[in-house]
Image (spheres, grey):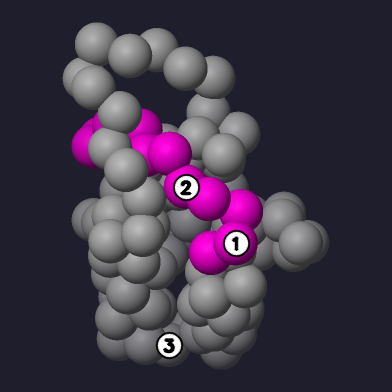
Amino acid sequence: MIVRIMGEGQVKLDDAHFAELNKLDDELLDEMESGDEAGFRRTLGALLDAVRRLGTPLPDDALEPSELILPSPDATLDEVREMLSDDGLIPG
């Protein structure tokens, strides 16, 4: 799966890693719903770090269709809230 982190680029990520990412996504959703800004910042950073760590960056000139788009590390709680579906940022 191709994942885009807004403002950074694309990463190719094996589907086997989505269980770990979904756990972080669930935490992020809980923190957003409760308005926990500090927890939101921490978990968003952990989610993006996990994508970077587990994925393989695509070259900057690659323009593959992104199957998943994640917010930039400095996105606000309100900006991320607008990106959410019922499942969070990561479907499933």
The mark closer to the camera, 3 or 1, is 1
The residue depicted at 36 percent of the width and 59 percent of the height is: 54
Above or below — where is 84 with respect to 50? Answer: above
Helix, strand or loop for disc 3: loop
**At x 58% / y 80%, what residue is drawn?**
23
Q: For mark 1, does the 10 Å Cα neighbourhood hold few (<14), some (14 to 19), or many (20 or more) residues?
A: few
Q: Give the alpha-carbon distance from disc 3 to disc 1, as whole Å.
A: 29 Å
Q: Quadrant of residue 12?
A: top left
The reply to whether the C-beta atoms of the residues labelled 2 and 1 are less than 8 Å apart is no
Task: Provide residue 77's location: percent of width, then percent of height.
Answer: 42, 65
- The magenta span reads 7-17
Question: Split into 4 quadrants, where in the image is the N terminus?
Answer: top right
Mark closer to the chain start, 3 or 2 = 2
Asked if residue 64 shows in the view, the reply is yes
Would you say 43 lies left or right of 85 here? left
Mark 2 → mark 1, Cα distance in angstroms: 8 Å
Three-letter amino acid code of the residue under disc 2 = Leu
Which one is nearer the viewer's eye here, 72 or 56?
56
In the image shown, does 87 or 23 lie closer to the viewer? 23
Indicate whether 22 appears above or below 84: below
* Disc sitting over residue 16 in the figure: 1
The verdict on residue 57 being magenta is: no
